[in-house]
Image (tube, rainbow, N blue to C red):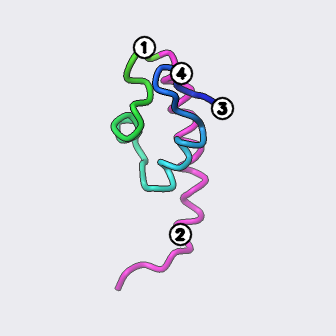
Amino acid sequence: MYICMCNAVTDHAIRRAAADGVESFAELQARTGCSDCCGACESEARRCLREAVSEMRPVLSFLPTPA
């Protein structure tokens, strides 16, 4: 589903960004351009990123830490 119509950013793109390590909205904007035009999608984009990051944290806790 499209979250940001101005820059054609989908919920999949936001989840992919979170999987790639994006955790802040500023990082998301820099990476995808999401919500840098009209701003109408900001609340939905923030919600989607917040959910994606929270889903990634349990996965990341199982990864081994570098020695």
Q: Nearer the viewer, residue 39 or 4?
A: 4
Residue assigned mark 3: 1
Q: Which is nearer the N-term, disc 2 or disc 4?
A: 4
Element type where label 3 sits in the image:
loop
* Residue 63: x %, y % from top left: 51, 75
Crowdedness of circle 4 by 10 Å Cα count: few (<14), some, many (20+)? Answer: some
Q: CA distance from mark 3 to mark 4?
A: 10 Å
**Disc 1 residue type (three-letter):** Cys
Residue ranking furthest to the right: 1
Residue assigned mark 4: 5
- Residue in the picture at 43% in, 55% down: 21
Q: CA distance from mark 4 to mark 1?
A: 10 Å
Q: CA distance from mark 2 to mark 4?
A: 34 Å
* Residue 57: x %, y % from top left: 54, 59
The mark found on residue 38 in the picture is: 1
Quadrant of the frame with the C terminus? bottom left
Quadrant of the frame with the N terminus? top right
The mark found on residue 61 in the picture is: 2
Q: Are marks 2 and 3 in contact (CB under 8 Å)?
A: no
**Disc 3 residue type (three-letter):** Met
Is label 2 or label 3 in front? 3
Q: Nearer the viewer, residue 7 or 28?
A: 7
Is label 2 or label 1 in front? 1
Element type where label 4 sits in the image:
loop
